[in-house]
């Protein structure tokens, strides 16, 4: 009987972790650390590999977006026209998710440098 109860508990736990991970993937703003923790918990509880792979791709994209965002901030601080324009074009071309205010600030700084 205990084996059956623990099996049911593991299924319930797996479903909870799966729902938590899928809900997080559908959120508008995702915290990188929280997503990493959710992926680790999902792996530990046997969530379907396809869902985990989707989450890992999203995590990689978020990390890349943060890296590009940092480069944009650096270009804004340096106020070098060519670097700033290259970063703005990169963000727009690759449709990188960053704060709209930051992109507008970058465009304003660029227009003042012309």
Image: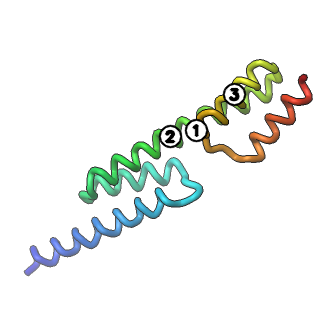
Instruction: Choose the circle earlier in sequence order: 3 or 2.
Output: 2
Query: Disc 2, disc 1: CB below 8 Å?
Result: yes
Where residue 9 sits, quadrant-wise, is bottom left
Residue tagged 1: 65
Label 2 neighbour load within 10 Å: few <14, some 14-19, many 20+ = some
Instruction: Choose the circle earlier in sequence order: 3 or 1.
Output: 1
> Marks 3/1: CA distance?
12 Å
Query: Disc 3, disc 2: CB below 8 Å?
Result: no
Query: What residue is shown at x 73% (from left), y 32% (from top)?
Result: 73
Residue tagged 3: 87
Query: What residue is shown at x 86% (from left), y 36% (from top)?
Result: 108
Left of 68 or right of it: where is 33?
left
Residue 8 locus on image (x, y percent): 19, 75
Q: Nearer the viewer, residue 5 or 83?
A: 83
> Marks 3/2: CA distance?
17 Å
Q: Quadrant of the N terminus?
A: bottom left
| Label 3: which secondary element | helix
> Marks 2/1: CA distance?
6 Å
Label 1 neighbour load within 10 Å: few <14, some 14-19, many 20+ = some
Residue tagged 2: 61
| Label 1: which secondary element | helix
Q: Which mark is residue 108?
A: none
Q: Nearer the viewer, residue 71 or 84?
A: 84
């Amino acid at each position: 009987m205990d084996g059956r109860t623990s099996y049911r508990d593991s299924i319930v736990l797996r479903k909870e972790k799966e729902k938590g991970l899928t809900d997080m993937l559908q959120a508008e703003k995702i915290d990188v650390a929280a997503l990493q923790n959710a992926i680790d918990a999902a792996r530990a509880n046997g969530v379907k590999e396809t869902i985990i792979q989707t989450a890992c791709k999203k995590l990689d994209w978020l990390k890349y977006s943060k890296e590009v965002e940092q480069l944009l901030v650096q270009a804004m601080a340096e106020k070098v026209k060519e670097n700033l324009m290259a970063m703005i074009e990169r963000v727009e071309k690759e449709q990188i998710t960053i704060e709209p205010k930051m992109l507008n600030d970058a465009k304003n700084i660029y227009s003042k440098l012309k």
